[in-house]
Image (tube, helix red, strand yellow):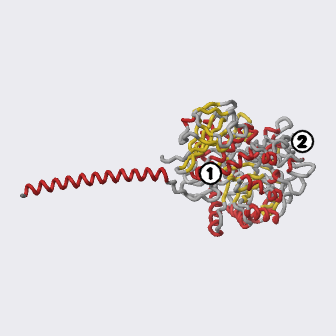
Amino acid sequence: MHAESAVNSGRTARAVAVSVTVMASLGLIAGGVTWAVLSRLSPPELRPLDWWEHCVLYQIHVRSYKDSDGDGIGDLNGVAMRLDHLKDAGVKAVWLSPIFSSPQVDFGYDISDYLEIHYEYGTMADFDRLVAKAHSMGIKILLDFVPNHSSSEHQYFKDSVKRVGEYADYYVWADGFPDPSNASNRLPPSNWESLFGGSMWEWNNVRKQFYLHQFTTGQPEFNLRNPVVVKKLEGIMKFWLDQGVDGFRLDALPHLVEAPPDATGRYPDNPEVPVKAFTHFQTGTTMQLYTKDRIETYPVLYEWRDFLDQYNEEHGGDTRIFLSEGYANISMTMLYYGTESGRRGAHVPFNFDFITMITNTSAARDFAYVIDHWLTYMPFGMTANWVFGNHDNNRMASRFRDTMVDGLLALDMMLPGVAITYQGEEIGMRDGYVSWEDTVDVLACNRGTPDTYLEFSRDPPRTPFHWDDSPNAGFSSAPKTWLPVGLDYRELNLAKQKRDPISHFKVYQKLTTLRNEKTLSHGRLEVGGLSLNTLYLVRHLRGHDTLVLLFNVGKAPDTVRLERLPYLALPATVYTSSTHSMRREGYRIYSQELTLADGEMLVLRGPPVTCY
């Protein structure tokens, strides 16, 4: 009886074990099937984005945008008059070139009063109306703020020259050294060269000292080792935040702090190089080792970010942000985002890699490398941005080729993060011709000659916007504009492109509309070269359409195979294409082999990725 009971117990245990195993297996299969079904059908939960994290940001060079009063100079009322264009274009935020009082030696980057509007641009009342109108249209307004230096006409500098109170130490002053060959002369305390030519040190005969200026002699450097100065500039930003601005673009940050002097008052000489050049890293025959990209710069920015974060917390509303300008190597640029330990800097440190690292001879893999380069170094949780042109560099269409304009616009709009447009890029504006006689850029005037000035001039990308084919391109009714209008304005202008069935501007509108799709705001990115000259960019997000950019950056037709494209299933539909493409919106692509004309771009829409 006992033995029989034991046998029955063993059989029961085995049966239970088998049953449990079968049930567990079925559970795993059911769970796996459920997960597979859910992964195929359910879009992922998406993080809400702040307004700036995926916006189209548009740079307005106020002096060249629209003249409202017939003096040949763009102004704030002109900007307000043409906010409709920005709304039509799909722009969400604007940063204005400097609008503060200035003698205009460097066209606003030499500020004589940070709390007043420059008279040629309007009044504070005009500014208030512009901000209110822009906000009513859903457009943010950011100001170009210059914290590195002021104008020599600023009262701060005048008081510093006279050693008045705290202002005595607002700027960088140095005694220099006796000239052994001339007892009545003083020598500068270092060999530092100005970016705009000549010594970085200028003697002031009233104070009997040299003052530092990295740019023109009319732009003395603030002493940002002085915490009083840092706080004073913070107070200026607060003034404009209280006026309703949505943030600032901080100018020339790599130059904020220079190396300190030794105990004798001598500053370290920048190293000399054998070949004379003028780049973002070299001025003349010296490298900017002690005058640029100093590690002491970053704590100043982080302190200002602390101030801005506190302002946001105290005042509520939409986030106010910092944009930062800095031509620096990738490691130094990434520090503008902040530190690994949690300090925060700029929300958007400008990414100039498409200006400094890519040319019209670059291959597709060069483009892919530049994109991966930024995203690889960017700290976790930060937001990327992409810049193809600005007021300091030749226009995108001139640096590359006319046939590449739409492809470059598509690249800007389809990459993750902030898409930045310099005024005129949306219609493919090229550099305007400016003769030596009409040249006003101080850099070209100081560095250049009638034969070489165009190597240095920043005037060509600053010529007035082409609104239509009327005199002065609809920019101004004046007999003469501050810079001449581009010679091609009758064929290349906004009004014509709005009338034409196919144009750069209409491609731009399609692209800004496409940015509303979750695939572009939240999707993953794949980028590479299908060939030497054809770039591909794939954006994909489970449950949402897959979007693909194909862009032939070469000068000849290129045939590629599409089966190498990740996450794209054929047939695919053309969403938009280059103005010179034969494939128009709605065109269906079935074949794995595709030939692209030189410069041709296609944006394709494919079915969603169902699982990974």
Q: Marks 2/1: CA distance?
A: 42 Å
Task: Check disc 2: other Cα within 10 Å, few if <14, some if 14-19, many if 20+.
Answer: few
Q: Is residue 210 visible?
A: no
As helix, strand or loop, the secondary structure at mark 2 comes to: loop
Residue at 54%, 49% (x, y): give it: 541
267 to the left or right of 68? left
Residue at 83%, 63% (x, y): give it: 123
State the residue position of label 2.
437
Point out residue 470 in the picture as x, y percentages from the top left corner.
88, 47
Q: Which mark is residue 221?
A: none
Front one among 507 and 362: 507
Instruction: Please say if 345 is above or below 612.
Output: below
Q: Are marks 2 and 1 in contact (CB under 8 Å)?
A: no
Task: Residue type at mark 1: give it.
Answer: Gly
Residue at 86%, 53% (x, y): give it: 73
Splitting the image into 4 quarters, where does residue 307 fall? Answer: bottom right
